[in-house]
């Protein structure tokens, strides 16, 4: 379960599954359209999550399970085909969306982790919620996830589209800057998690060796999972969801900060971490608007 600590930091903690879920589709369909669009934004990220999770597994030998993706595959196709109906409040489309969200939750119960639906893009949304404060435009988590999905998709596809693998450098941690941005308490909590995935010189060399060995193979594997940024953007637009920081009403400079630093919050290795360790994350962030 996603839990907000007393400090304001969002983390994942073990929780038991609900005994049942009861929803009135008519009520949900009649609700303001941005609510359903937020739910849609939380679904469109699946391919980005899978690429992040698979890359982490291939580089770090960490746990991976494609079960949730197999479980959701047919329902995902159905929901994406009905994207315009989400915007229109069509009960059939809303019912399909609710089912897909429930299946994603079931995936957590199967694997014991939420990685299949929450990787680099969710970290960006969490950063916004934790640190925007008075700059927060009041947007919902799923709306932010949809925008961040496009951002992480651009990072993934930008790096994977290169003939040579990125070259990892040891992680540089600026504790004073983290404390300035996050406050001392949350910065300390984040540092505990961040240090679990940071690279020293030996770690960077190990990843560079692995990348050099598997790069063409990893590119092919990820290509089979990738949904293009243009396709994801079109789906979000059909569903009436935001597709940029400007659409969210979020200060662009702060959004770029979130892209640059959200990976510091959790011990989940994503393409934002790769871009950071390769020294190119700031370049990707600067292109966001």
Image (tube, grey):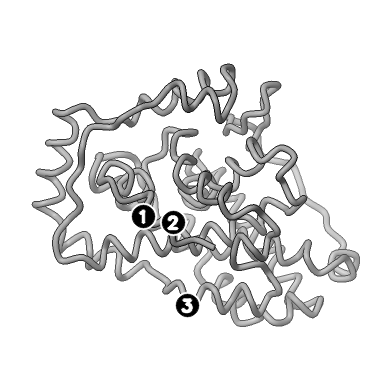
Label 1 belongs to which residue? 283
Instruction: Assess disc 1: are there few (<14), some (14-19) or many (≥20) residues with their C-alpha within 10 Å of its C-alpha.
Output: some
The N terminus, quarter of image: top right
Q: Nearer the viewer, residue 71 or 188?
A: 188
Q: Residue at x 90, y 70 (%)?
A: 30
> Could you give the CA–CA distance between mark 1 and mark 3, rounded to whole angstroms?
20 Å
Residue 246 as seen in the image, left or right of residue 53: right
Residue 36's spot in the image, x, y percent? 75, 65
Query: What numbered label is drawn on residue 230?
Result: 3
Q: Nearer the viewer, mark 3 or mark 2?
A: 2
User: In the rendered image of this protein, does residue 206 appear above or below residue 48?
Assistant: above
> Could you give the CA–CA distance between mark 3 and mark 2, rounded to whole angstroms?
19 Å
Disc 2 is placed on an element classified as: helix
Disc 1 is placed on an element classified as: helix
Q: Earlier in the sequence, mark 3 or mark 2?
A: 3
Label 2 belongs to which residue? 286
Residue 243 as seen in the image, left or right of residue 216: right
Q: Nearer the viewer, residue 197 or 77?
A: 197
Residue 39's spot in the image, x, y percent? 69, 61
Please identify the quarter of the rendering in which residue 264 is found: top left
> Could you give the CA–CA distance between mark 1 and mark 2, rounded to whole angstroms?
5 Å
Q: Residue at x 68, y 60 (%)?
A: 248
Disc 3 is placed on an element classified as: helix
Query: What numbered label is drawn on residue 122?
Result: none
Q: Earlier in the sequence, mark 1 or mark 3?
A: 3
Tag 1–tag 2 contact (CB < 8 Å) = yes
User: In the rendered image of this protein, does residue 98 appear above or below residue 12?
Assistant: below
Q: Nearer the viewer, residue 165 or 110?
A: 165
Q: Nearer the viewer, mark 1 or mark 3?
A: 1
């Amino acid at each position: 379960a996603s839990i907000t600590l007393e400090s304001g930091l969002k983390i994942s903690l073990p929780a038991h599954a609900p005994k049942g879920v009861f929803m009135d589709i008519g009520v949900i369909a009649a609700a303001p359209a941005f609510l359903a669009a937020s739910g849609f934004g939380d679904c469109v990220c699946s391919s980005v999550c899978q690429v992040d999770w698979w890359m982490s597994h291939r580089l770090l030998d960490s746990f991976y399970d494609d079960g949730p993706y197999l479980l959701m595959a047919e329902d995902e196709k159905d929901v994406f085909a009905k994207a315009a109906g989400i915007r229109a409040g069509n009960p059939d489309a809303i019912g399909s969306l609710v089912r897909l969200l429930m299946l994603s939750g079931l995936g957590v119960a199967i694997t014991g982790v939420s990685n299949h639906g929450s990787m680099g893009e969710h970290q960006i949304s969490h950063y916004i919620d934790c640190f925007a404060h008075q700059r927060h435009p009041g947007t919902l988590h799923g709306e932010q996830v949809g925008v961040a999905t496009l951002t992480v998709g651009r990072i993934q596809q930008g790096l994977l589209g290169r003939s040579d693998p990125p070259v990892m450098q040891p992680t540089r941690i600026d504790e004073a800057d983290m404390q300035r941005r996050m406050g001392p308490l949350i910065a300390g909590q984040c540092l505990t998690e961040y240090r679990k995935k940071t690279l020293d010189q030996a770690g960077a060399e190990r990843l560079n060796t692995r990348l050099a060995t598997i790069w063409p193979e990893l590119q092919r594997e990820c290509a089979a999972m990738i949904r293009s940024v243009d396709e994801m953007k079109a789906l979000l637009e059909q569903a009436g969801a935001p597709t940029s920081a400007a659409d969210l009403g979020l200060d662009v400079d702060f959004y770029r900060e979130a892209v640059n630093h959200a990976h510091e919050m959790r011990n989940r290795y994503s393409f934002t971490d790769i871009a950071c360790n390769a020294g190119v994350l700031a370049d990707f962030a600067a292109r966001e608007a």
